């Protein structure tokens, strides 16, 4: 595909997504669905205007998906303004730990018993497919940091957390396949890949997000320095958190998510946790004038500007990755057992794991919320990243095709199935919630 055609195609697609964004919110369609269809149409299966294959382009896919997930995790973290001591955090923590482990276990069983995979490959498949996706879940994410509805908050926070908590199982699967040292009795995996990597990642991200947020606010209030260029601040914090975590063999995904949450918590503590407080629009001229002296306006302006910038980057990452995925689907020829595995994952494993994970969560989670959480286990870019990571870090060649077939199929089906159902289900849920509040 020559550069002229790329410019024309990219321009048409991006302009359409900008103009039609409001229409898409009212229809059972998502930008991801449109990009997936465009990728299939323009890729080798259609007009053949670009050629992408797997695993030949696995390095490219790993880097592209890595960047997309990192930006999305930071963006999700910025949306979660709820104080860390708030009980609402219990649900996503249960989902990211208990439901995650159950999902990996159940997918492992399906991989061994149905797909005929060796144990290590089945565990690896569980780690690849277990995390829900923060990139493609925009229609069910928190809409406003100032009004974090419980269902949306739980799904958003789960997607932010479990993109990191899935990494130990990817490492375990690779270790069982001989590509990584697990240590006697799995001690190295447990101490380094689970305890150290997860704990250090959260600590590094939380520390950097808090420190940088406080430093910038101090400079602005006391010295009228560090004003503007908030976009560079966002990118700098993402790079620092991710790079510092990876440098000490901690999980960069958890670090970036924690950095986003901590950065937003600085604003929440400065201005109060009142969810009805109005946010300042980043282009509010009054906000620009008072930013230097108003102790309340400064943290709100900072957090909102960084969030708005990251949301735009998040959308661009989604477009790029889903287009590539659409181009890869031409080589996916799933057997009947693969389709059965996809159905089991979406309709059985996800609902069962969330039901068990939320058992005893208390009356704060309604039956409707539990059912919707069980359905909206959206798989996406995180799964593609873990697959490409495994391919580039020792996955035996005979296992590449069966695992990639399942992973690409799951993500494609999830994009379509969850994309079609997200708008009508969330509209219905919102209407029911308003009726219940009125009574």
Image (cartoon, grey):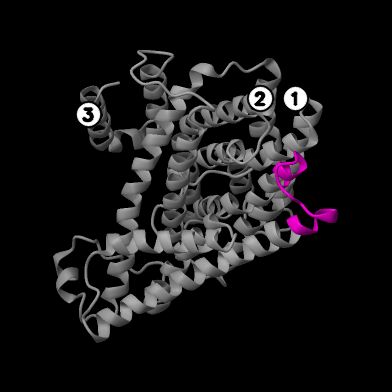
The tag on residue 319 is none
Of labels 1 and 3, the one closer to you: 3
Q: What element does badge 3 sit on?
A: helix
Q: Which residue is mark 2?
A: 402
Could you give the CA–CA distance between mark 3 and mark 2, rounded to whole angstroms?
35 Å
Q: Residues within 10 Å of mark 1 (few under 14, many from 20)?
A: many
Circle nearer the N terminus (3, 2): 3
Q: Quadrant of the N terminus?
A: top left
**Taking 399 as reference, is 304 left or right?**
left
**Taking 406 as reference, is 152 left or right?**
left
Whether residue 173 appears in magenta in the rendering, the answer is: yes
Circle nearer the N terminus (1, 2): 1
Residue 34 at x, y percent in the picture = 37, 27
Q: Residues within 10 Å of mark 2 (few under 14, many from 20)?
A: some
Q: Residue at x 73, y 35 (%)?
A: 121
The tag on residue 7 is 3
What secondary structure predominates along the stretch shown in magenta?
Answer: helix
Circle nearer the N terminus (1, 3): 3
């Amino acid at each position: 595909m020559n550069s002229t055609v790329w410019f024309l195609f990219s321009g048409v697609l991006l302009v359409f997504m900008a103009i039609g964004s409001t229409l898409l919110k009212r229809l059972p369609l998502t930008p991801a669905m449109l990009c997936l269809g465009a990728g299939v149409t323009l890729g080798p299966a259609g007009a053949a205007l670009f050629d992408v294959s797997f695993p030949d382009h696995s390095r490219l896919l790993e880097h592209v998906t890595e960047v997309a997930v990192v930006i999305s995790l930071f963006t999700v973290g910025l949306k979660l303004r709820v104080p860390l001591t708030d009980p609402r955090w219990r649900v996503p923590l249960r989902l990211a730990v208990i439901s995650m482990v159950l999902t990996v276990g159940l997918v492992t069983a399906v991989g061994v018993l149905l797909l005929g995979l060796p144990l290590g490959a089945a565990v690896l498949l569980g780690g690849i497919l277990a995390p829900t996706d923060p990139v493609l879940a925009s229609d069910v994410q928190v809409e406003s940091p100032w009004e974090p509805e419980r269902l949306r908050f739980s799904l958003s926070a789960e997607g932010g957390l479990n993109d990191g908590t899935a990494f130990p199982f990817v490492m375990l699967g690779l270790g069982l396949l001989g590509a990584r040292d697990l240590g006697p009795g799995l001690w190295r995996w447990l101490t380094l890949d689970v305890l150290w990597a997860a704990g250090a990642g959260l600590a590094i991200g939380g520390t950097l997000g808090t420190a940088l947020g406080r430093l910038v606010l101090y400079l602005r209030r006391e010295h009228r320095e560090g004003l503007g260029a908030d976009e560079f601040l966002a990118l700098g914090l993402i790079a620092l958190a991710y790079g510092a975590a990876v440098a000490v063999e901690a999980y960069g995904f958890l670090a970036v998510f924690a950095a986003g949450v901590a950065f937003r918590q600085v604003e929440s503590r400065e201005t109060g946790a009142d969810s009805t407080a109005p946010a300042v629009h980043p282009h509010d001229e009054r906000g620009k004038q008072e930013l230097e002296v108003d102790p309340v306006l400064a943290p709100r302006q900072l957090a909102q500007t960084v969030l708005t910038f990251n949301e735009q980057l998040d959308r661009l990452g989604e477009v790029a990755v889903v287009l590539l995925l659409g181009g890869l689907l031409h080589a996916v020829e799933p057997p009947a057992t693969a389709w059965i595995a996809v159905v089991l994952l979406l309709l059985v494993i996800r609902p069962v794991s969330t039901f068990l994970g939320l058992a005893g969560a208390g009356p704060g989670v309604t039956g409707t919320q539990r059912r919707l959480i069980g359905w909206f286990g959206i798989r996406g870019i995180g799964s593609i990243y873990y697959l490409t990571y495994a391919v580039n870090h020792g996955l035996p060649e005979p296992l590449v095709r069966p695992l990639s077939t399942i992973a690409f199929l799951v993500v494609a089906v999830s994009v379509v199935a969850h994309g079609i159902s997200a708008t009508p289900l969330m509209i219905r849920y919102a209407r029911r919630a308003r009726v219940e509040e009125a009574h």
